[in-house]
Image: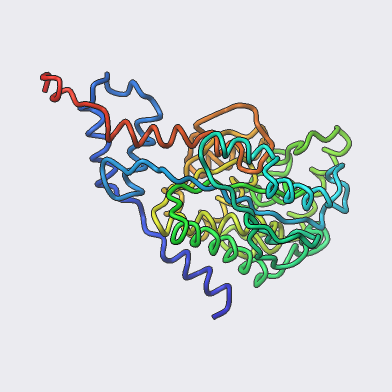
């Protein structure tokens, strides 16, 4: 079976969340020992978790895992970032060695770290945390031609899906967090967000690692050029990913779709994850019901992407690192949302029913 067919089949397996379980959770919140609505967003999050799990109260996720998808980008040759592509491989080594921000925060919240090499331009040493799924050593320059072929984009989607499936089936992971690594990857993220929601480059392009004004103007023009060159069709998500996406963006779409298939909540990290989530939404609209916005990235495209996804971020810390760091910080909030539904006493328990 061609990889494009496999992606289509994966998307077709996504079922809508259980509206009855979500409704039961909302009703249960009205009976708990608190004023109605006093837990704010935590209450609706708990209801959504019940819908994802198909039961109320929902299980408390106890085994979170972050999947950091890594790839390089041909568009880097246009000068959209001051950092060389070799930093991607160096950071993958840092993830595997436990010395990155994602590792420190993962240890804080008790999450396991998995790294997927879906398109790093360098050869990487084998490591227990590193999954090999390299489709190709980086993309082509999306401003001069397609970033990759449709089949390569589909292979990347399925590489991410395979890691997520392995973690859920064999590793017992019951809460997925999306992470990324790829120097220059906020440029394809801006392209994807513009392609899927129709916003101009000026509204979706940010400063990434903190580029200066001249580089920022160049970056905006590169995104604008790519969109004009390809005229991507939002109704063809695989075509959009192939034209203006990154290998890690495609892989993250696969992680999200697989979480949705298994009814496992997927906490989105920043703008890279948000752009991948738009692709997942285009593949399977019901997949949005399994997404949780971990935080609001400082990148401008993140806000408009989350608005399109219908998601309200749990945190706003001004973060823009990626790696899964902001998503991981939301893990305890997701766990708390499930726990209060299952462990709080009701008014009837206290004799007020």
How far across and how far down the image is residue 222, in percent? 81, 49
Q: Is residue 18 above or below residue 150?
A: above
How far across and how far down the image is residue 63, in percent? 45, 46
Is residue 216 found left or right of 197 in the rendered image? right
How far across and how far down the image is residue 322, in percent? 66, 41
Q: How many marks?
A: 0
Q: Quadrant of the N terminus?
A: bottom right
Nearer to me, 127 or 231: 127
Q: Is residue 148 above or below residue 173?
A: below
Q: Quadrant of residue 321?
A: top right
Q: Quadrant of residue 39?
A: top left
Q: Quadrant of the C terminus?
A: top left
How far across and how far down the image is residue 70, in percent? 69, 54
Residue farthest toward the bottom in the current orientation of the protein: 1
Q: How is the image coloured?
A: rainbow
Q: Residue at x 77, y 64 (%)?
A: 137
Q: Residue at x 80, y 52 (%)?
A: 225
The answer to whether any part of residue 272 appears in the image is yes
The answer to whether any part of residue 285 appears in the image is no
Q: Is residue 350 above or below residue 341?
A: above
Q: Residue at x 41, y 48 (%)?
A: 289
Nearer to me, 215 or 324: 324
Is residue 230 found left or right of 271 in the rendered image? right
Q: Is residue 182 above or below residue 105?
A: below
């Amino acid at each position: 079976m061609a990889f494009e067919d496999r992606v289509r089949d994966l998307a077709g397996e996504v079922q809508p969340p259980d509206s009855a379980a979500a409704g039961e959770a909302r009703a249960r919140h009205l009976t708990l020992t608190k004023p109605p609505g006093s837990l704010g967003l935590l209450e609706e999050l708990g209801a959504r978790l019940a819908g994802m799990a198909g039961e109320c109260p929902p299980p408390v996720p106890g085994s979170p895992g972050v999947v950091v998808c890594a790839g390089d980008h041909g568009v880097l040759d246009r000068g959209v970032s001051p950092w060389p592509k070799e930093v991607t491989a160096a950071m993958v080594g840092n993830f595997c060695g436990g010395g990155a921000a994602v590792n420190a925060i993962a240890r804080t919240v008790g999450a396991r770290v998995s790294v997927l090499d879906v398109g790093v331009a360098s050869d990487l040493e084998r490591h227990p945390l590193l999954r090999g799924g390299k489709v190709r050593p980086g993309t082509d320059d999306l401003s001069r031609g397609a970033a990759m072929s449709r089949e390569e984009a589909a292979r990347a989607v399925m590489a991410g899906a395979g890691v997520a499936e392995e973690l859920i089936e064999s590793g017992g992971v019951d809460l997925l967090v999306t992470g990324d690594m790829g120097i220059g990857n906020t440029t394809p993220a801006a392209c994807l967000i513009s392609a899927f929601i129709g916003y101009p480059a000026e509204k979706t392009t940010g400063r990434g690692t903190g580029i200066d004004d001249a580089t920022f103007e160049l970056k905006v023009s590169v995104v604008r050029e790519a969109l004009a060159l390809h005229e991507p069709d939002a109704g063809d998500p695989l075509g959009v990913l192939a034209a203006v996406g990154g290998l890690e963006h495609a892989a993250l779409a696969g992680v999200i779709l697989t979480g949705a298939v298994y009814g496992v909540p997927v906490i989105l990290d920043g703008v890279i994850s948000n752009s991948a989530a738009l692709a997942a939404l285009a593949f399977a609209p019901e997949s949005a019901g399994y997404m949780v916005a971990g935080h609001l990235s400082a990148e401008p495209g993140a806000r408009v992407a989350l608005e399109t996804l219908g998601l309200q971020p749990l945190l706003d810390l001004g973060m823009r690192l990626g790696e899964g760091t902001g998503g991981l910080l939301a893990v305890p909030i997701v766990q708390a949302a499930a726990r209060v539904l299952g462990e709080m006493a009701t008014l009837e328990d206290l004799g007020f029913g």
